[in-house]
Image: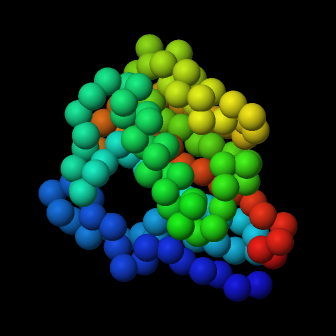
Amino acid sequence: MTIKRYGVEGGTGTGGQKLPFARAVEADGWLYISGQTPMRDGEVVEGGIIEQTQLAFENCLTIMREAGYRVEDVVHVTAVLTDARYFSSFNKVFSEIFSGNPPARICSVQDLVVDCKVEVDMKCFRADRK
């Protein structure tokens, strides 16, 4: 089994800090995407829960596609919301992205270390990449 790391040169976090982890890691057909927040160029994009959810997923999907995976390959999503009242709006965006092939999921409410409303990560699988 080989392990391939994507983005180990480090992404940029708030305030321009270099992030000390890979954007994603692929092992034995699995792709594990690190938690993504609604950031562009190291800064949180202002907006409501719908806009922030769309961007957090967009960031995950960009990494997934760069690694050669498709939306159909997503098997699990972990989502963290900072307020339970965001759940319905989050589900709206989630349903649009995964309308044909919904993955398993966990969604919780907790504080985030970045000042935003949502963070998501994904686990993808492709048997032909084993």
Residue 83 in which image quadrant: top left
72 vs 51, left or right, is right
Identify which residue is drawn at 21% across, 65% down: 17
Identify which residue is drawn at 54% across, 77% down: 5
Residue 26 in which image quadrant: bottom right
Residue 16: image x %, image y %? 17, 63
Q: How is the image coloured?
A: rainbow
Identify which residue is drawn at 33% across, 67% down: 11
| Number of numbered discs visible in the structure rendering | 0
Instruction: Looking at this view, name the residue that lies furthest to the bottom.
Output: 2
In the rendered image, the vertical position of residue 36 relative to residue 116, given as above or below: below
In the rendered image, the vertical position of residue 130 relative to residue 111, given as above or below: below
The reply to whether residue 87 is in sight is no
Image quarter where the C terminus lies is bottom right
Residue 15: image x %, image y %? 15, 57
Q: Nearer the viewer, residue 41 or 9?
A: 41
Q: Nearer the viewer, residue 12 or 63?
A: 63
The reply to whether residue 126 is in sight is yes
111 vs 108, left or right, is left
In the rendered image, the vertical position of residue 21 relative to residue 55, given as above or below: below
Instruction: Looking at this view, name the residue that lies furthest to the right.
Output: 127
Residue 79: image x %, image y %? 54, 38
Residue 74: image x %, image y %? 69, 50
Identify which residue is drawn at 49% across, 43% down: 57
89 vs 42, left or right, is right
Image quarter where the N terminus lies is bottom right
In the rendered image, the vertical position of residue 62 relative to residue 44, given as above or below: below
Instruction: Looking at this view, name the residue that lies furthest to the left.
Output: 15
